[in-house]
Amino acid sequence: MRYNPDYKIGDCVVRRRGTLGNMDGTAAPGKVELIEERHGHVMATVNFGGRLDEHVITASDLRKIPKEPCRLCRERGKTWRGDDPTCSFPDGGEFDPEGWNCATANRLRDISGQDEPHPSSDYRYCEDQNYTTIKIDGIDLPSGNAYALWMTWYKHRGRTEGMWILSVDEPRKPTEADALAIIGALSTSNP
């Protein structure tokens, strides 16, 4: 397993088994002091009430610390019953396809032309899979110049499965700042 920055230093739950923790295999609370990759393993130094233990960890060993949603998700909040939204631009970073009902991704989908034609968008669908190419070559993006934003999603549901900025270089995932610049330039309402 490779080091994953999602497993941050801070208050977490580390599952401890056998002689390293609860004999019944249940989770024991602790504070992660350090996470590093050594000898091909991810190692965590965990403070259990003043006692430091070192553990080889796996992806399921740490409960992920919640990430900060994007600006538009924070402003919108949750306006429906049911599952909570999962931001597609957590911590202001790159697009994450695991997002669901993200306000920023939804605003980009509004520009896509699925519900109403948009002059900058070439919207298509095939067997319930939607995809669009949005012309963005005149927009000053924080991550650099580009020709188009390409997006895809299934039916009319909340998850945007893919989003790429296409430029002369290789495709890249848009950041929240890129998405807000596109929305600001092409949306009929303010970002």
Image (cartoon, rainbow, N blue to C red):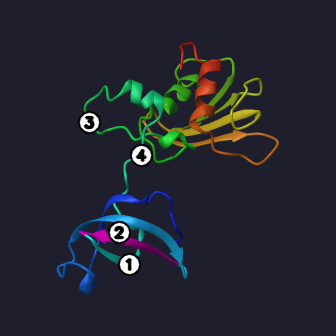
In which quadrant of the rendered view does residue 156 lie? top left
How far apart marks 2 and 1 lie (CA) works out to: 13 Å
Does residue 172 lie above or below 188 as drawn? Answer: below
Assess whether mark 1 and mark 3 are in contact (beta carbons under 8 angstroms). no
| Mark 1 crowdedness (10 Å alpha carbons): few <14, some 14-19, many ≥20 | some
Dot 4 or dot 1, earlier in sequence: 1
Instruction: For marks 3 and 2, give the CA distance.
Output: 28 Å
- Which residue extends farthest left? 24
Which residue in the protein does label 4 denote? 67
Image: 190 above or below 139: above
Q: Residue 54 carries which label?
A: 1
Going by the numbered disc 4, the residue's amino acid type is Lys
Q: Of discs 2 and 1, which sits in the foreground?
A: 1
- Dot 4 alpha-carbon crowd within 10 angstroms: few under 14, some 14 to 19, many 20 or more: few
Asked if residue 68 can be seen in this view, the reply is yes
Q: Position of residue 166 (x, y in %)?
A: 73, 40
Query: Regarding mark 3 in the picture, which secondary structure is present there?
Result: loop
Q: Residue 61 carries which label?
A: 2
**Amino acid type of the residue tagged 1 in the rendering:** Glu
Q: Can residue 89 be seen in this view?
A: no
